[in-house]
Structure formats: C-alpha cells, structure tokens
Image (spheres, rainbow, N blue to C red):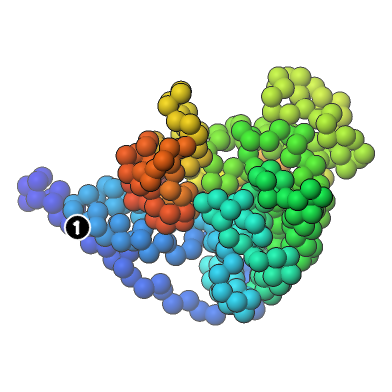
Amino acid sequence: MTARARTRTLSVAAATAALAAVTAAAPAHAAAPAHVAPPAALYTPPANPDANAQILDLLRHGRLQDAAGVLAMTRTPQAVWFDGGGTPADVRKSVHATVTSAARRHALPVLALYNIPGRDCAQYSAGGAADTADYEAWIDAVRAGIGDQPADVILEPDSLALLPSDCGMDDAQGSKTAERYDEIHYAVDALEPLAGTRVYLDAGHSGWHSVNDIVPRLVSGGIDDATGFFLDISNYRSDSELAWYGKLISSCLSYVSAGGDAGSCPNQYWPTADAQSWLDANVPAAPSAMKHFVTDTSRNGQGPWTPPAGVYPDPQDWCNPPGRGTGARPTLNTGDPLQDAKLWVKIPGESDGQCTRGTAGPADPERGYQDPAAGAWFPQQALELVRNANPKLLP
C-alpha cells in the first residue's frame, strides 16, 4: 500500500470514528451504587446539539482536524446551566438527572445557576425569576434535585458584580439591591448545607471591580456561609492574574471577618511586593481557614482582547471577542491551596450575544456579520477557540 493510500485509509478511519462518536446514543449505565465513591473527576455533560451538527458538517467537507478539535472541546468537562426554564418540578427533575448521571460516572457536576430576578440588568442574557418568592421556590427545587449527591454550584454569575444599583434598575431606597443580597443569601443557606454541595458566589473578575469593592458585596451576599467565590465566568483574564486577584479577595475576606475594614485591603492595582507585605502583616490565617475560589478557564487561553483604539463607541471587549482560545483544562488539582478548581463554566462555542460594539448594528462590526443570540452555538467562534487553544486541544 502506498503512503498516499495509507493516509487516505487513516483519514477515512478517523472520520468514521469521529462520526460514530458524535452520532452514537449515550451508553447505558448501571444504577448508581448505594454508596457512591467521592468524585474522581469532573463531569462532562452532553454537547450542544448544534456543536455535533458542526462536527458532522466539518467531516462531510473533509476538515478532519477541525472536526476533531471541536469534538475534543465538547468532550472536555463543562458546567451544566440551569436558567429557570420550566416549573419547579421540571427543575428538580432536570437537576436530579444531572447529578445522578454524574454520580454514575464517579464525576463531580458543576451546576451554573442563572435565574436571579433582573438577570444581566436586562441586557443580552435578560430574564430570571419574576420576583423573590419565585426565585426561592426555584432554589428549593434545585435543592431537592441535588439531594445528597455531590455538586459544585456556581451561584448566579454577575449577580454581585452587576447589582441593580449598578445599572439603573434600583429605586431611591436601594430595595432591589437589598433584595438581590437576600436572594443570594437564601440560596447559600438552602444549598451549602447539603451533604456533598459546595457553593461559590460571584466575584466578577480582576479587570472589573477592585478588591475593596467586591469584598463588601460578597459579605452582603452571604460569603461567610458559602465555600467561596468564583472568578472570570465567560471572560478572558489570565490564570496568573486571576490567582493573584483570588488570593487578595480571600485574604481581604479573612481580614474583614476578624473585624478589619475592606477599604484597607490591598487591591489588584497595588505593587505586588507592597500587597504581599501587607498580607504578611495582617492576614495570619492558614489557607485552610480562608474562603477558597474557582476560576473559569474555558476561553482565556489567549488572555483578554484589546480592541482597536478609537474605533468603536463601546468596544464590548467581553462580547464574542475575536482570536480567543480555550484555556487550561478543567481540574480539581490546581496546586494553589486557595484555588479549588479550574473549570469550564461558560460553554466554549456558545455566543455571548449579538454584539454591536456601540454601533447601530445589527452586524458585529469586528466580525462583519451578525452574531448568534446569547447561548446559541457560534460555529465561527468555536473554530477560533479550537485553533487558538492554549494549551492545544489536540496533540
């Protein structure tokens, strides 16, 4: 057989294997054992159906490397998002199905809860529960669905970093923001006591709020009763920047819990040596006694996008920026005593929304076409994330 023939045979075999992987039904699994072992890995949920459609289309056009890359991306552990659709009974059933599926695989599911009233300040991902009572009923359903199975909960991305008072949705008395804090704290009190559940609260990211600003928000949201906080959901900050920011927040929370003032804490804009000296002098707690954090590395492999200067009225650097790549693989072994995990929370390949960057739209002027709606599969971006992955998704 010639080298060319062998190459063609291998290509056909690879395509056939990938096609079978995409189209095959989920394998049957035995019932979960009575005593489930602690999770040894993170859970990988079923892929977005449109991701599978893209993989098949790439295969049909002979683009085997791209197909394999997208397939590898979808087969990496990722969060499962619950955004309030359906009745409480539907939510309980859906959450239960997820945690049960994960338990059968001895895997830890990451549940991203995204149903807070006034979600996303009525922007691209607007929606959420109708009011506090509706939200509490929804959280009660989530709690019933989790039961005694292990789960990590990413509680309401942007809920504390983007309060009603930040976007003109509050009243003069600040009642909407007060309700937001009460809603978050209710969820913490409902979920954190569950046997296998760890709850993490929203702390935005290192390019958004200063440590001095986000720490009081975490305290008001009930961080004292939660495992910790999360960083960089759906964003692009580098791992090293997030690790330092997370350490500063954890340290400031420890300082505040001992009676200190958050305004005195060092923030991410301090010289590193000065900040470390302050921590050494003011935060004696061991990492085991401090609040821990997790980060979203699903799209930060190339770091944040720097928009061209003076081109767009509102560059929206967070919204489907070009040229990004997937980042560090999800892991529960970070090597950092304060960082519990690196996770893929935002589903890589799903759109942030229809970005117009301050122009009349509807096209994204940076891309030259209209982006898909928030949460819809974005084939062009999926390929960017695969091709620019750091570390690479394929050998």
Q: Amino acid at mark 1?
A: Arg
Q: Find residue 95 and report its horizontal and vertical position in percent.
A: 59, 71
Indicate whether 251 appears above or below 373: above
Q: Is residue 79 visible?
A: yes
Q: Considering the image in quadrants, where does the C terminus appear?
A: top left
Q: Quadrant of residue 136?
A: bottom right
Give the structural element (helix, strand or loop) at label 1: helix
Left/right placement of residue 148 relative to residue 234 reads right
> Which residue position is annotated with label 1?
60
Q: Quadrant of residue 260?
A: top right
Which residue lies at the image location 86% right of the left edge and 26% below the top edge?
281
Q: Quadrant of residue 100?
A: bottom right
Which residue lies at the image location 35% right of the left edge and 55% below the top edge?
71
239 vs 28, nearest the viewer: 239
Q: Find residue 6 and report its horizontal and vertical position in percent.
A: 13, 50
Left/right placement of residue 29 relative to residue 143 reads left
Left/right placement of residue 87 relative to residue 276 reads left
- State how many labels appear: 1
Q: Residue furthest right?
A: 259
Left/right placement of residue 368 relative to residue 175 reads left
322 vs 193, nearest the viewer: 322
Indicate whether 312 appears above or below 14: above
Which residue lies at the image location 57% right of the left edge and 63% below the top edge?
83
249 vs 163, nearest the viewer: 163
Residue count near mark 1 (Cα–Cα under 10 Å), binned few <14, some 14–19, many ≥20: few
